[in-house]
Image (cartoon, helix red, strand yellow):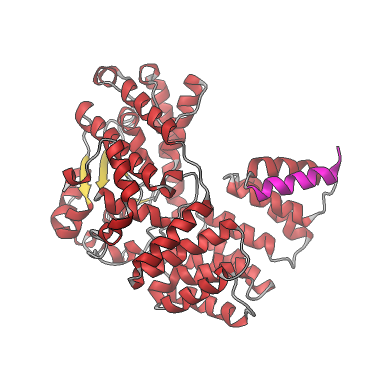
Amino acid sequence: MNPAQKYQQAQQAFAQGDWARAKDLFGQVVRFDKKNEQIHTAMGFCAARLGQFDEGRRHLAKAVKLKPMSPDPHVQLGYLEAADFNSDAALAHYKRAALLKPGHPPAVFGLVDVLRKQGSYDEAAKELRVALDKANSMDVQLAEALALIAVKTGQQAEAIDAINQVLGTDLDDKPRALMLFRLAALLNDQGDYDGAFDAVELGSRLKGVPWDAAGYDAQVRGFLDAWTPKAFESVAKSNEQSEQPVFILGLPRSGTSLVEQIIASHPDATGVGELSAMVGIAGSLQMNLTGALSIFFTEAGRLTPELLDEGAKQYLGAMHTLAGKLGVSPSATRIADKQPHNFAHIPLIRAMFPNARIIYTQRDARDTAVSCFFQGFDGPMGYCYDLNALGRYIAHERRVVRHAAESLGIELMTARYEDVVADPETQIRAMLDHVGLPFHEDCLSFHKTHRQVVTASTDQVRQPIYKGSLARWKRYEARLGPLFEGFEQGGFDPDSES
């Protein structure tokens, strides 16, 4: 083996975001250079992004030992601990990195991001101001940190100026796309809708996240063919009788965070954010039974009570573990999981948890689409970067949920965002009744509930219900032609839900 050649291959895989391959290649190189702090840091970086947190900690601890005055291993440990929901540990590492190298942009960004997710905007602004005052020129990560807290701290104009400074430099496509999405959000808030949409369109092209629309069409057809009323009627059932889980599902940006925060504000309930467990369990079952991955679980006739019992055990274990990491009670009467993509697994959820409550969040499809288009999500959500694909995806989501509720007869509550905004108390009472909890006044003032929120809606759930996002799509109506075409191709009329 040529270590220099392997190292070059590892760097290429790292630059492409192929974390698994990069970690494997760095692992081959490190055997010849065991005291290289940069390689251990890179391996820890990759492991953290693969969710292999214990392995990541081992490599990063080795890097710290090898080079204790380097801030980079602490930055990566901060990212890892934040991803593993250990926010106090994350803060400690980011602060250590900032102490070793004052104003270090990656450390400052991480620090600001954790603090804002905890609702500590003033402290975040203070840490950022120190770094900005030290900086000789604007940095991408400092500009992004400023953009993340600008609305809460009244620094929108400064953030727009910072982003434009960065956009005026020679940036690669990915950081340029990130800056454009942050700029779009600020311009939207300022009322510059054409400028905002221009930024999002360019950012979406630069981000270059692929989406196989035809392949998704086929998977939806497979789901509908597999889960017939007859198949669901005869499907095996788990012996798990827990009523603890509350599945809040639907499209991203449809109100899942709002509903979770409302329920989590009840003294007998809590929330764990977007738990990935059910998606993972469904995928593992599909792979084990068919040997092929699929977004949807389709093997209804091959389920057994034993498989479902094991899945329920795994899910509850993951839910309780995450509750503990978030500092909330694993023994709460109800624990809300707001993973939007669980809409693909409603029949499996019902077979696995016969007594669990399901809430389907629905928002005007056009508003949901615009919000998704503007969000700049991380991960493989390629449908959010193409308006036509987004329209088809939303049409499919409506079809899948309607099939589960109407054709399969699965009980779920539809919580329409517009209804919650128009009449909060009536809707909140209905939600609590659906999940089997008595009404409590704290749920009306949900924005005062102090809890860590780590999703895209971290800022929104910390403010009272407001009407500013209703009919947002009309600001951009003239530019939404591809979205409307996608709706039509999917056989969906958004006006039918009004």
Residue under the point 53% across and 76% down: 127
Write the start and end of the magenta stretch as one range: 1-16
Q: Position of residue 394 (x, y in %)?
A: 32, 42
User: Furthest residue to the bottom?
Assistant: 133
Nearer the observer, 239 or 349? 349
Q: Is residue 234 above or below residue 143?
A: above
Magenta residues, dominant SS class: helix
80 sits left or right of 409 in the view: right
Q: Position of residue 148 (x, y in %)?
A: 45, 67
Residue under the point 29% across and 33% down: 400
157 sits left or right of 88 in the view: left
Residue under the point 64% across and 47% down: 16
Corner quadrant of residue 55: top right
- In the rendered image, is residue 57 in sight? no
Nearer the observer, 218 or 68? 218
Q: Position of residue 156 (x, y in %)?
A: 42, 75
Image quarter (top left, top right, bottom left or bottom right) of the N terminus: top right
The answer to if 9 sits in the magenta stretch is yes
- In the rendered image, is residue 419 in sight? yes
Nearer the observer, 387 or 438? 387
Q: Is residue 241 above or below residue 455?
A: above
The answer to if 421 sits in the magenta stretch is no
